[in-house]
Amino acid sequence: MNNKLEKMKNDPCKVRLFIDDDEQPIAELNTPVQFELDTSKLIDGEHTLRIVGKSINGREGIRKINFIVRNGPAIDIEGISENKVVDGTLPLMINAYDKGDYNKFVIEGSETPKSIPSWLWIILIAFVGWAAFYLITYFNI
């Protein structure tokens, strides 16, 4: 019996890792372990990592971790937003860009051009109005 207790102390717990609702685990490991999850094989969107641990007594514990994969190109859109009420024709600016090659930086397409925000136009008009007022009052003295 003493030998059996000694063996139980040295036996590690086992964990199985599942992605989403897959029945087949992506890995079956003895703990403690460091594991690298390769998300490049997953489609973009929401996923769940389900970790099932089994103790040496046979009891199981489950932990679920939700995460979002975004390996594909980032997509930016200007001109419409989520749940916006619209009518007529909408001018849209759409850009998709990828991380690309990590060894070199490509400027073209890596940033989404934006239109000038309305608050900046208001500040510019106010400044031009103030400058005109200043010039008119300065030269009238």
Image: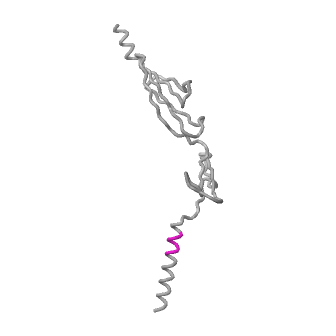
Residue at image position (56%, 40%) is: 45
User: Looking at the image, which residue sits at the far right?
Assistant: 89
Q: Kindly indicate the quadrant of the structure image that contains residue 141.
A: bottom left
Question: Which residue is drawn at the image coordinates 53% and 40% (left, top)?
Answer: 68
Position in image of residue 23 (x %, y %): 56, 24
Residue 77 left/right relative to 14: right
Q: At x 50% / y 87%, what residue is drawn? A: 136
The colour mode here is: one colour
**Residue 16 image position (x, y, % from top left):** 49, 24
Q: Is residue 120 above or below residue 34?
A: below
In this picture, is 76 found above or below 28? below
Look at the magenta stretch and give its main secondary structure: helix
Occupied quadrant, residue 22: top right
Does residue 119 lie above or below 70 as drawn? below
Q: Residue at x 51, y 79 (%)?
A: 129
Give the farthest residue toward the left: 2
Task: Give the number of callouts.
Answer: 0
Which image quadrant is residue 85 in? Answer: bottom right
Which residue occupies the foreground of this view, 33 or 62?
62
Residue furthest to the top: 1
Q: Position of residue 24 (x, y in %)?
A: 56, 24
* Span shown in magenta: 121-126
Q: Position of residue 34 (x, y in %)?
A: 47, 30
Question: Dividing the image into 4 quarters, which one contains the N terminus?
Answer: top left
Above or below: residue 2 compared with residue 76? above
Magenta stretch contains residue 9:
no
